[in-house]
């Protein structure tokens, strides 16, 4: 069964600090991995997308890494800001000749305190 | 572009009533996903359409749920009869070409069934 596990479940950091969120998956065969940011009361918004051949992708202060061999990904946030407070969701998509069903992680809830 | 549009944004209804949620895709997109999000289960894919055709509805909880795409830009998700356990936030998302494309989420409909 395809699964995506994220850790930690929640995280509290001080403004200006860095943090790293983890994502482990069992989806196979693997097509791509995305990180989404979901602000409270809003729909998820894509931050990064990586295929199996990519091992790092940046979007401003967000940097995602991927190790397709160990089936692990991380999202590193540099110099956190109050606006980074949100849920971060890891989504892994399989390759398929027909149907395409992504598997979602439960998310990591990040709170950035001033 | 206005993005994915969902209506209503909030819906409160009584158990047993019919509920219809609506979604308008981004112009030019041809794949549509309906999701349900709860604190307990996170984001769950309910059904996926490609070019107006339902590709996978294995996530639809039971026969009380039905989804349609009467045209290329519009979809409805109907729950009849509704139950308190259906209370959740329902999102729709669209992509240009399904598969590995980034999904653009709507703002969601918060459904409360009393």
Image (cartoon, coloured by chain):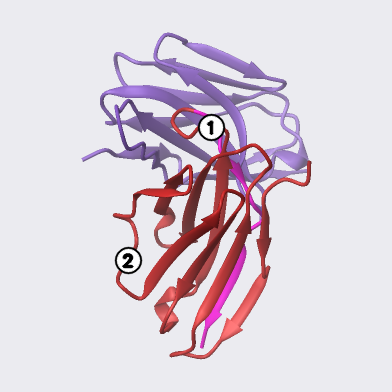
Who's the residue at 35% across and 38% down the image?
A4
Q: Which mark is residue A100?
A: none
Q: Are marks 2 and 1 on the same chain?
A: no
Q: In this view, does A67 lie above or below B44?
A: above
Question: Distance from label 2 to label 1 (Cα)?
Answer: 26 Å
Chain ID of residue with mark 1: A
Badge 1 is on which residue? Answer: A35
Q: Is residue B53 above or below residue A90?
A: below
Q: Say few, some or many: other residues with alpha carbon within 10 Å of mark 2 (under 14 / 14 to 19 / 20 or more).
A: few
Q: Is mark 2 on a helix, strand or loop?
A: loop
Say which of A4 and B90 sits in front.
Answer: B90
The C terminus of chain A, quarter of image: top right
The N terminus of chain A, quarter of image: top left
Q: Say few, some or many: other residues with alpha carbon within 10 Å of mark 1 (under 14 / 14 to 19 / 20 or more).
A: many
Palette colour of chain A: purple
From the viewer's perspective, tell me whether residue A63 is left or right of residue B41: right
Palette colour of chain B: red
Badge 2 is on which residue? Answer: B61
Q: Is residue B26 above or below residue B74?
A: above
Q: How many labels does the image show?
A: 2
Is residue A87 one of those drawn in magenta? no
Q: Give the range drawn in magenta.
A: B101-114
The location of residue B57, given as percent across then percent down, is: 33, 55
Q: What element carries label 1?
A: strand
Who's the residue at 27% across and 31% down the image?
A26
From the viewer's perspective, tell me whether residue A73 is left or right of residue A38: left
Mark closer to the observer (2, 1):
2
């Amino acid at each position: 069964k395809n699964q995506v596990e994220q850790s930690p479940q929640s995280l509290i950091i001080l403004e200006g600090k860095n943090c790293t969120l983890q994502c482990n998956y069992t989806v196979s065969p693997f097509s791509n991995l995305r990180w989404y940011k979901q602000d409270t009361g809003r729909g998820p918004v894509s931050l990064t997308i990586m295929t199996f051949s990519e091992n790092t992708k940046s979007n401003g202060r967000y940097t995602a890494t991927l190790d397709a061999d160990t089936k692990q990904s991380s999202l590193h946030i540099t110099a956190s800001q109050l606006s980074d407070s949100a849920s971060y969701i890891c989504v892994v998509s399989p390759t398929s000749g027909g149907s395409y069903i992504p598997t979602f992680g439960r998310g990591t809830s990040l709170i950035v305190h001033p | 572009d206005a993005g994915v549009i969902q209506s209503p944004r909030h819906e409160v209804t009584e158990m047993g009533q019919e509920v219809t949620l609506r979604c308008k895709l981004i112009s030019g997109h041809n794949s549509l996903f309906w999701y349900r999000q709860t604190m307990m289960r996170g984001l769950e894919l309910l059904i996926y359409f490609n070019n107006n055709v339902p590709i996978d509805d294995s996530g639809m909880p039971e026969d009380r749920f039905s989804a349609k795409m009467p045209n290329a830009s519009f979809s409805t998700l109907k729950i009849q009869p509704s139950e308190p356990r259906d209370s959740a936030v329902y999102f729709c998302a669209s992509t240009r070409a399904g598969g590995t494309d980034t999904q653009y989420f709507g703002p969601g409909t918060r459904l409360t069934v009393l």
